[in-house]
Every structure is written in structure tokens, then in C-alpha cells.
Amino acid sequence: MTNTNTSLPNVANQCKTINVCFALWAICLGSIILGLALFVFGTLDIVLEWNPDENLVTLLGVGTLFYEAGDFLVMLHSANLPAIIGLVIFQYFLLYHCWKLIPADIARTTPIKAVGFLLIPIFNLYWMFVAYRGLAKDMNKTSQRCGVQFSVRESFGLHYCWLWLVYFPALVCAMVGIDDLLTVFGRNVTVLNSLLMITFIGCLAGLIALVMLIGFLWSVKNGAIALLKHGDSGISDTIVLQRKIEEQERKQECHETDSD
């Protein structure tokens, strides 16, 4: 077995990388929340200045908030585009580094697949259950094997995934635009009420999903650091040995290919 002291600098660097990824992710999130607050105040201002005689939603009152949400959400995404891109990048970096800590015989997927498949449209609605909840389950199995007294909150990952599925239709409504959807499906009160209800429920689900995501990433970050620092239980040696075996297997495959 490798002496754990030789791996301490590497462990310190990995812990630092994970902490920095989470900190930068939190900064990007704070920027987006600030933009969201400006969006809400701006939309409320429209509601207060709304003229019922010139608007389609004459009888819906505060429903105007969600009727105008599409244009404002597009503006919000455009204004916060750098922060949104940074948020996704640092979140995926964090997931990638956490997946790297899971031994191959426990991990249900590889770190590259876990993150890469999240970039596939539509398919990622299924894959996020693997990448998020699966990460929590596999990290907990690794903790149990190594005797680490820390448990990642699997429920946060699961709830985040389901809430994102509820939020997704509202995001589509906002990006396409309720007015354009009314043109497609018909300008009547039933269709309008349905679209507003989808947007309202989706917005609530999105806010709760954000809370779940914050709790999940915080738990995963702490779980990863606990695994890295638990050198006495052999987690560092296990990872090093596993990577050496995988490297030897790759060299052997390359040698066999060259021989053929």
C-alpha cells in the first residue's frame, strides 16, 4: 500500500479544487439571484402600471405578472448569460471531481459520462437522476465501505430532479412567450389560464429546486472532502491503487493492439 503521507499534498489540492468550484458556483448563483430580484421588482412595477383596457388578461389581475414573464425572463437570461454559463461550468466541474472519488466497482457511470450526458438535450431530463441522485447514493456506498462517518443527502438530489421536471414546461413557456403560444393554441381564457398556471407552478417548483440544489451541492462538497481527508481508512490508497490498475489495463490493451 502507498504511504498516505505522500498523498496528503494531492488530497489538499483536491480539497482546494472542490472548495474553489463551490465558491465560484455560489458567486455566479448570487449574481443570478440579484438579476432575478430585479426581474421581480420590474415585473411588479408593470403590474402596478397595468392598464386593464389594453391588456388581454383583463380579468386575471396579478396574472399579468406571469403573462409578461416570458419577455423579462429572456432579458434576464441575456443579462445574466455570463453568470449562467459560469454557474453551469463550475457546477459540472464540482460533479466531475466528486464522481472521480468513487471506486469503479461502485460507480454506476464514469465522471466524463456523468457530466457529458447532462449536455444532451431532452435526454438530460432522465440522466440528471443518474448524475445527481446516483452520485449521492454511490458516495454514501463509498463512505460506508471506507468507514467515513458522513452521509450525503440523497433526498435533496432526488427532489431537485423532480422539481426541475416540473419547472421545465414553465421555462419553455417563458422562452417561447405566452403571447406566441396563445397564437398557436388559440386566444381564449381556457388556454391562457392553463399557460399561466403552468408558469406559476413552474416558477414555484424552480425556486424550491434551487433550494434543493444548494443543499445537495453543499452536502456533496462536504462528503467529497470527508472522503479525501479520511486517509486513515484507506480511501486515498484505494483511489491510487484503482487508478494504477486502470492505467496498467490501458497499457496492456494498447500493447495487445500494437502486437496485432
Image (cartoon, grey):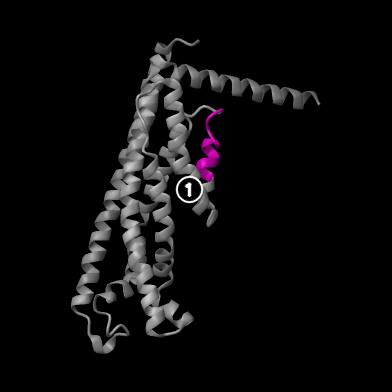
Q: Is residue 113 magenta?
A: yes
Q: Which residue position is annotated with label 1?
A: 128
Q: Is residue 77 above or below residue 100?
A: below
Q: Residue furthest right?
A: 260
Q: Could you tell me which residue is drawn at 37 percent across and 66 percent down?
A: 74
Is 43 left, or right, of 107 in this rendering? left
User: What residue range appears in magenta?
Assistant: 105-116
Task: Categorize mark 1 by other alpha carbons within 10 Å: few (<14), some (14-19), many (20+).
Answer: many
Q: Could you tell me which residue is drawn at 31 percent across and 43 percent down?
A: 215
Residue 110 occupies which quadrant of the picture?
top right
Q: Nearer the viewer, residue 249 or 81?
A: 249
Measured as percent of width and height from the top left, residue 88 is found at: 41, 48
Q: Is residue 225 above or below residue 184?
A: above
Measured as percent of width and height from the top left, residue 245 is found at: 60, 20
Q: Is residue 4 above or below residue 66?
A: above
Residue 8 occupies which quadrant of the picture?
top left
Q: Could you tell me which residue is drawn at 43 percent across and 39 percent down?
A: 95
Amino acid type at image mark 1: Met
In which quadrant of the rendered image does the C terminus lie? top right
Q: Dot 1: what SS? A: helix
Residue 179 occupies which quadrant of the picture?
bottom left
Q: Could you tell me which residue is drawn at 27 percent across and 84 percent down?
A: 59
Measured as percent of width and height from the top left, residue 128 is found at: 48, 48
